[in-house]
Amino acid sequence: MIVVAPLLVMHGLSAEFFRPLAWSYIAAIAASLVVATTVTPGLLMLLSPKPTMPRSSDSVFTSGLRRIYAGAAGRAMRSPALALALVLAGFVVGPLIWSYQQRSLVPTFKETDVFVELQGPPGASLQAMDRAAATLIRDLRTVPGVRDAAAQIGRALFSHELADVDSATVWVSLDPSADYRATLAAVGKVVAAHPEVNGEVESFLSKKMRESLTGEDKAISFRIYGQDLNILKAKAEEIRGAIGAIQGIKNPEVEPQQEQQAIDVEVDLDKARSYGLKPGDVRRAASALIGGLTVGSLFQEQKVFDVVIWGRPEIRRDSNDIQNLLIDTPSGAQVPLGDVARVSVVNTPSVIHRQGASRRIDVEAEVSGRSLGAVTEEVKDRIKEGAFPFEYHAEVLGEHVERQATLRMLYSCLVAAAIGIILLLQAALGSWRLAGLVIIGVPVAMLGGFLATCLGGEGLSLGSVVGLAAVVGLATRHMIMLIRHVQSLEALGPEHGNGVVLQGASERLVSVLASALSIALIVLPFVAFGDIAGLEILHPAAVVILGGLVTSTVMTLFIIPSLYPQFVAKAARAPRPLTPEAA
């Protein structure tokens, strides 16, 4: 529980994702503790043989297994150099793999329902987008492996993501029996063959999970702040070109700043004053005639309808008509709008993106074939080399930046958790040295998981982290139980040394192997099925667990017995004597 406790104090977007996982894990551990201390003893009393019955001796297979193990473990205990070498490998190889292996908390889900985001030209009409989406859908339905496709154009005013009619989302349903990668590549080629719209194929779960963890829908993002949109666009294109040459950057693109035509009315203060008009009077009159002005609401059949004053359509056919609009003056006369204001048609962004008091524009990219952390650091260096005008700056966002910020926040909590774990181990084993023995055994247990990830050619993902946590928990439990069992044997007799340690390890052999084999049989199907849809988290977790079971079993049965005599002084073999009844 202490291991996951730091996740409960996280803040930000990542906390909303990981905090429920931590609570679920804590609830499962608490439930298993209650079962182990109440249900299991009760079932043992009901189902175990009666005391009058003679105890059955070990089977031939178990006896032979223990003889083989005693010989191998005895040789390992006489020369603990190999055990020390494995411990050193755990401390070196594991961190190296963690540093250089590609890591991503967001798995790539092989969803059979993907979507294509379409963006038409600025100001594209509903009819034009309807035709473009219909053409794309017709072509997508001819792709082998595509079952069907449908589109939604624009988003309603009060929807989760507001969008104009010049954007659309095409949902594509894939056949589960088809080759997923080949079908997805074919869909991408069809989308790329439609130059009239900009399209991008994505899977829904991967995008939403990345947004929930980082606030961005791409692996890496660069945000530029400033006031002038033209300068922002120029710097965004400059950064896009600079990072495009970085190894690992894939498909860098500038956030589309869609523009549409708008009528700009700039009041001439001197001319308006000569007619007795205030700037607000001119703007309100022009807004009412051109864009409409809401003056009230109409309630009918539990529905609300806005009452809007609006000029007739024929008065806003072109800019000349708008310049000739008559504005009422305080004297009762009317003056054309063009006499008191400059009227022009300009291109303006359909959506203005701001953060704080500054406008912003994003440059987004995917990362492939290289560590996300290495790519992010190189991108930061490239941005530092560039020059920005006064009051303009850029920052790097994305999964790696969010992860680093979260880790920095967790460092103090992780240190406190580590201290708590060491204290618990010392309390359970009665020895600081033995607590240290358990701590140094953890990297060895994780070594198999790291190697399995490398051999499988898979990066470290959320499933891999879950698998490593499971391996650490299993290995720690086996180490504590083995050391406590050896301590109980030492407390029952005057003998100490390798013989007692080997006896305790031999007596724990069957339980350790049975536990490891049971877990291996559980995770083996998930490894055999491969990286298929539905196993994006379970498959990497199973691979790590299967590899970690090998090294954790070797560590429990060979390394701990080999190092136990070196970590316990003869005068402190039994730091907390046990009575025969307690043993």
Image: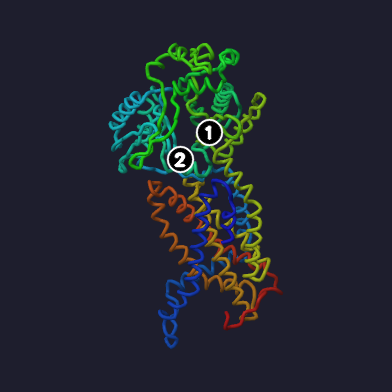
Viewer can see residue 457:
no
Determine whether the residue tagged by mark 2 lies in a helix, strand or loop.
helix
Q: Is residue 241 above or below residue 80?
A: above
Q: Is residue 326 above or below residue 449?
A: above
Rendered location of residue 53, percent (x, y): 42, 86
Relative to 80, 533 lies left or right: left
Which amino acid lies under the numbered mark 1 shown in the image of this protein? Gly
Determine whether the residue tagged by mark 1 lies in a helix, strand or loop.
loop
Identify the image quadrant of the C terminus: bottom right
Tell me, for residue 207, which label it has, or none.
Answer: 2
Count neighbours of disc 1 (C-alpha within 10 A) and say few if under 14, some if 14 to 19, many if 20 or more: some
Q: Earlier in the sequence, mark 2 or mark 1?
A: 2
Whether the residues at callouts 2 and 1 have beta carbons within 8 Å, the answer is no
Rendered location of residue 214, percent (x, y): 53, 42
Viewer can see residue 212:
yes
Choose top left, top right, bottom left or bottom right for residue 2.
Answer: bottom right
Q: Residue at x 55, y 53 (%)?
A: 447
Choose top left, top right, bottom left or bottom right for residue 118.
Answer: top left
Q: Which residue position is annotated with label 1? A: 248
Relative to 494, 558 lies left or right: left
Count neighbours of disc 2 (C-alpha within 10 A) and say few if under 14, some if 14 to 19, many if 20 or more: some
Q: Nearer the viewer, residue 195 or 128?
A: 128
Q: Residue at x 53, y 71 (%)?
A: 506
Q: Nearer the viewer, residue 416 or 581?
A: 416
Which amino acid lies under the numbered mark 2 shown in the image of this protein? Lys
Task: Looking at this view, name the residue that lies furthest to the front.
Answer: 331
Q: Residue at x 52, y 11 (%)?
A: 339
Rendered location of residue 232, percent (x, y): 57, 24
Tell me, for residue 47, which label it has, or none.
Answer: none
Q: Nearer the viewer, residue 57 or 311?
A: 311
Identify the image quadrant of the N terminus: bottom right
Q: Is residue 101 above or below residue 430?
A: above
